[in-house]
Image (spheres, rainbow, N blue to C red):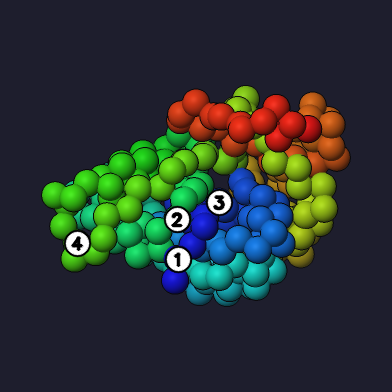
Amino acid sequence: MKLDILVFGAHPDDVELGCSGTIINHLKNGLKIGIIDLSRGELGTRGTVETRNQETTQSTKVLGVQLRENMDFKDGLFENNDENKIKLIKKIRKYKPEIVLTNAPNDRHPDHGRSSELTIDACFLSGLEKIETGQDIWRPKHIYHYIQFNTILPDFVVDITEEMDKKLESILCYKTQFYNPDSKESETIISSEDFLESIKYRAKDLGRQSDCKYAEGFISNQTLKVNSLKDLI
Ligand SMILES: [Zn+2]
C-alpha cells in the first residue's frame, strides 16, 4: 500500500504527543497515513510492554490511521547504524510516502534525537540506487519534525482546532504513561497533571500566535515554499 505520510516515533506515544492532531486532520482530507514506532518503550518507568501494546492499539483506533507497525528496536539503546538504516529504508521503499514526520532533532529523551537522525539518513539513502534491497528506490520529498518535550520554535504550524479533543483522547489511551489519578505507579515527569496541561497549553499558545484555537508546530530541514501567498491564509 502506498502512503501519503509515514510517521516515525522512537516510542509509542511520541506520535500522539507530537502530531496526532495533524494526522487526524489529514486523514479527514483523504490522505493515507501510517505510523512506525521504533521501539515498544520497554524501559519506561510505568507500564509494561503488554500494557503499552494495548494502549497503542487503542490509540491507533482513535486516530484511524491505515497502518501502525513497530520496528522492535531496543528502547534507549537502539543505534543509528547500518542495520537499522537498511530496515527503515525497506519500510520507506515499501510505503513510498511523499512526506515523513519524525521526532524533534533534540529533545529531553536522547532516543528522540537518534530517531530523528536515523529517519533523515534512511530517507536520503532510500533514494540511492546502489543501496539494493530488491525494491524500487524512493526518496520522500519532505521531512518534518514534530515538537514534543522541549519547546522549539516551529517553522510552520497546522491548525488542529477541530482535532484537539481527539488528540487528547489518543494521548489519554496511554493510561500508564500520562496523568491518571487512579494510578498507583511511581510518578514521572510525563505522568504529572502539569505535563498534560503543558500539551494543551502549547497547542493553545501556537494557535494564539497563528490565529486559530489550537495548533501543532513542525520544523523542516529544508527551505519551505508555497505556490501562492494565499496558501498561507
Ligand atoms: Zn519518546
Q: Of circles 3 and 2, which is in front?
A: 2
- Please say if the residues under marks 3 and 1 sit with CB atoms less than 8 Å apart: no
Mark number displayed over residue 71: none
Report the residue marked by disc 3. Answer: 14
Give the Cα distance between marks 4 and 1.
17 Å
Report the residue marked by disc 1. Answer: 2
> Quick check: is the Cβ at mark 3 less than 8 Å away from ligand 1?
yes
Q: Earlier in the sequence, mark 1 or mark 2?
A: 1
Q: Earlier in the sequence, mark 4 or mark 1?
A: 1
Q: Nearer the viewer, residue 193 or 70?
A: 70
- The disc labelled 1 sits on which kind of residue? Lys
Q: Earlier in the sequence, mark 3 or mark 2?
A: 3
Q: Of circles 3 and 4, which is in front?
A: 4
Mark number displayed over residue 133: 4
Report the residue marked by disc 2. Answer: 97
- The disc labelled 4 sits on which kind of residue? Thr
How would you rate the neighbour count of disc 4 (Cα within 10 Å): few for under 14, some for 14-19, many for 20 or more? some
Query: Which residue occupies 71% across, 55% down?
Result: 25
